[in-house]
Amino acid sequence: MQLRHSRIDLALRHPWAIATDVGRGGGKSVYPVVLVELQDAQGRSGVGEASPSSQYGESHETVASFLSRVDPRRLSFDDPSGSLAYIESVAPGNYPAKCALDIALLDGASKAAGKPLCEFLGLGPFADGRHLSSFTIGIDTPAKMAAKTEEAGRYEVLKMKLGSPLDRENLAAVQGAAGGRTLRVDANAAWQTKEEALRMIEWLASRGGVEFVEQPMPPGLPTADWAWLKQRSPLPLVGDELYQSASDAPRCAECVHGVNVKLVKTGGVTRGKEALEAARAQGLQTMLGCMIESSILITAAAHLASLTHFLDLDGNVLITNDPYAGVRNIGGRLTFDGVPETSGLRVRRRPDAGTD
């Protein structure tokens, strides 16, 4: 097996900021990701992607370092589970790099089986047009957030980031421009105590039109604080940073009403599927989310959509230079209708895509 990887700087349509960026010089204009390709002696291939986040101490360099330690001779499309066991043994953590390899292995394995990934995983055919993703509005000035909301007029569900001193003004601006569309709120752990979080959630509820609140507090707060907030919150709570893997499901059942699973947090499709199933077994609602990502990661996640209640798979429509084409996003509705590839991830490289 040959293993190749390259960095691509994804260019954002608008500067991107969340609560952790406030006070740190503003939002990002580019977001580096790492693309991985595996090819075996038979000419079979698979692609994957890592979208590392500085929020978790990850970078292009940490991904490249992990990949340099992987012996590609230990990888096989004919034995993805054995290959993944080897990858886990290379080093702990490094979930974005493991995610890229997991996706590439499953892409190659499902193409070899002549099946789209969702069917290869036993999840049945993809339900074209029935899976609805939100579109995210990053933190900015009220005027700019209103303009972004108007620009996203074809999307039925919006998710806005909170966690700045202008939260109240920003919410008013977005709601004013949203025209009654469904709105979700993501605080990215901005509210530091259970009392502050409850005050903010009660204010959100009083405004009306908010479906749920994602990650209101830091994940390291005691379970008792989260349980206190869950008991009193007038809006459903969804854990993101709180939920890293399937082993977190029992605690999250005490803390929140639902969880946000991201492939780069769990280590790929295999662990992401386990995390979704574990959460559902605990009675939690499930959402698939993303970082800023190309169509490789977004499409890989879309194959797990049947295991979710909500989707936030918009990372590829927030950028201008997606190197791949895959699942289509039509006003938030995900579909493979018109996609010529019929097996594996069902992605293809764009002819004008470049690397750094």
Image (cartoon, rainbow, N blue to C red):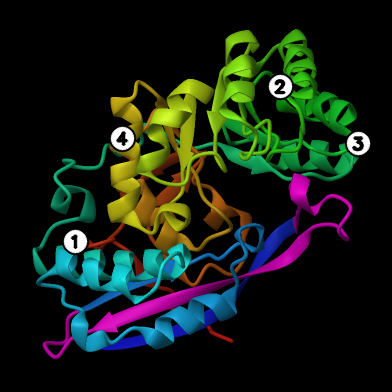
The quadrant the N terminus occupies is: bottom left
The amino acid marked with disc number 2 is Gly
168 with respect to 328 (left or right): right
Of the two numbered discs 4 and 2 on the same chain, state the one appearing first in sequence. 2
Q: Residues within 10 Å of mark 3 (few under 14, many from 20)?
A: few
Quarter-wise, where is residue 165 in the image?
top right
Q: Which residue is denoted by mark 3 in the rendering?
A: 165
Q: Tags 4 and 1 in contact by the CB under 8 Å rule?
A: no
On whether residue 37 falls in the magenta region, the answer is: yes
Of the two numbered discs 2 and 1 on the same chain, state the one appearing first in sequence. 2
Label number found at residue 343: 1
Q: Which residues are magenta?
A: 15-44
Q: Mark 3 to mark 1: distance in Å?
A: 47 Å
Q: Which residue is denoted by mark 2 in the rendering?
A: 179
Q: Mark 2 to mark 1: distance in Å?
A: 39 Å
Q: Residues within 10 Å of mark 1 (few under 14, many from 20)?
A: many
The amino acid marked with disc number 4 is Ala
On whether residue 170 falls in the magenta region, the answer is: no
Q: Secondary structure at mark 2?
A: loop
Look at discs 3 and 1 and give the one toward the viewer.
3
The amino acid marked with disc number 3 is Pro
Of the two numbered discs 3 and 2 on the same chain, state the one appearing first in sequence. 3
Q: Which residue is denoted by mark 4 in the rendering?
A: 278
The quadrant the C terminus occupies is: bottom right
The amino acid marked with disc number 1 is Ser
Q: Residue at x 35, y 20 (%)?
A: 283
Q: Is residue 147 above or below residue 326?
A: above
Q: Tag count in the figure?
A: 4
Q: Mark 4 to mark 1: distance in Å?
A: 27 Å
Q: Secondary structure at mark 4?
A: helix
Which of 130/277 is in front? Answer: 277
